[in-house]
Image (tube, rainbow, N blue to C red):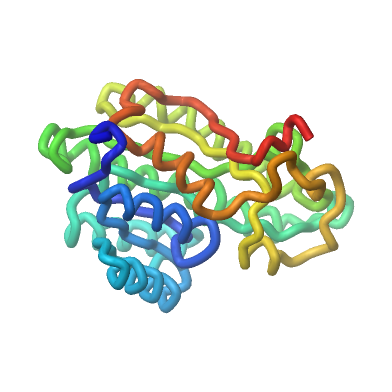
């Protein structure tokens, strides 16, 4: 099972203070990684890191506002200085508020893309630089793993009001391909997980009109838990996936067959 171990590796998870991000952080920590939780909710990030430590894992946290380039650069520098270049970066943080297309505003669009796609680009740029600069000695082997969390809405699990959200996640999926190409010479793989319906505080508290459309129906296996998404992320993060890059994995409880 060493091929699925992250022992001695550092994993940076954005939006890890709650919801899917917290589930991902737990799974990676259980696989042996030192998990650094990055979140705009500093208190929540600190609390989640403390919970992982209390459970016997290695964890830390950093405050991060993905919509602010200076915050991203400073947070990444802090992580690298304190913990070394991460082996894993999980771009999980995102906004999922709804605004109907015919009522859409450029302000809402820009806010959504600032976090979901532009923010992911910024932190990927900074952490990839650190991975490359670390060379063959980074985390005991060189290279690294970048995993982007998009949405199964890209393949049909849509709701009304998600024009900004889905377009930002589509941009993130396209960014996966571009990064996979440019980072392959550095042994850095880049892949995408497509989470299905998960009952998280972010999903339950999303602003906008009530969700309607095909995305609200129950999947064949029921709704996912945050840790289910974490298992998909774990596969891409491990040594077992060293030759897997530019791929998508839907973790959606069989939505496509229901």
Q: Is residue 216 left or right of residue 53?
A: right
Residue at the spot 65% in from the left edge and 40% down from the top edge: 253
Q: Residue 132: x, y in percent?
A: 22, 36
Which of the pair 142/125 is nearer the observer? 142
Q: Which residue in the rendered view is the most extreme toward the left?
A: 137
Q: Nearer the viewer, residue 85 or 231?
A: 231
Please give left or right for residue 188 compared with residue 193 in the image.
Answer: left
Tell me what residue is drawn at x 30 percent, y 72 percent: 54
Q: Is residue 67 above or below residue 118?
A: below
Task: Specify whether 114 is left or right of 136.
Answer: right
- Above or below, 25 against 183 in this view is below
Which quadrant of the structure image shows residue 100? bottom right
What residue is at 32 percent from the left and 44 percent from the top?
Answer: 88
The quadrant of the image that shows the C terminus is: top right
Q: What x and y, as percent, mark residue 218?
A: 78, 47
Q: Position of residue 17 (x, y in %)?
A: 46, 67
Q: Which residue is rendered at x = 70% and y = 65% of the image?
A: 204
Q: Quadrant of the N terminus?
A: top left
Q: Is residue 194 above or below residue 197?
A: above
> Can I make out residue 183 in this image?
no
The answer to whether one can see residue 201 in this image is: yes
Q: Residue pushed farthest bottom?
A: 43
Residue nearest the viewer, comparing 6 with 110:
6
Total numbered circles: 0
Q: Residue furthest right?
A: 102
Residue 81 at x, y = what percent?
A: 17, 59
Using residue 114 as the reference point, say whether residue 163 is left or right of it: right
User: Between 244 and 208, which is closer to the camera in this rendering?
Assistant: 244
């Amino acid at each position: 099972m060493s091929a699925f171990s992250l022992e001695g590796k550092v994993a940076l998870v954005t939006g890890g203070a709650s919801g899917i991000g917290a589930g991902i952080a737990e799974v990676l920590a259980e696989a042996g990684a030192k998990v650094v939780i990055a979140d705009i909710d500093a208190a929540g990030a600190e609390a989640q890191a403390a919970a992982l430590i209390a459970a016997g894992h290695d964890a830390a946290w950093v405050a991060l506002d993905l919509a602010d380039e200076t915050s991203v650069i400073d947070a990444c520098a802090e992580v690298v200085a304190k913990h070394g270049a991460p082996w894993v970066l999980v771009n999980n943080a995102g906004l999922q508020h709804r605004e109907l297309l015919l009522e859409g505003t450029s302000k809402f669009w820009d806010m959504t893309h600032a976090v979901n796609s532009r923010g992911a680009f910024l932190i990927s740029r900074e952490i990839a630089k650190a991975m490359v600069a670390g060379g063959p000695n980074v985390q005991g082997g060189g290279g690294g793993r970048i995993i982007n969390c998009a949405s199964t809405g890209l393949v049909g699990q849509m709701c009304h009001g998600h024009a900004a959200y889905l377009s930002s996640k589509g941009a993130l999926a396209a960014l996966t391909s571009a990064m996979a190409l440019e980072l392959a010479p550095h042994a850095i793989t880049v892949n995408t997980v497509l989470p299905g319906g998960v009952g998280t505080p972010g999903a339950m508290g999303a602003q906008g009109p009530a969700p309607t459309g095909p995305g609200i129906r129950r999947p064949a296996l029921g709704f996912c838990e945050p840790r289910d998404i974490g298992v998909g992320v774990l596969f891409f993060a491990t040594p077992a996936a060293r030759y897997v890059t530019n791929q998508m994995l839907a973790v959606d409880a069989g939505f496509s067959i229901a």
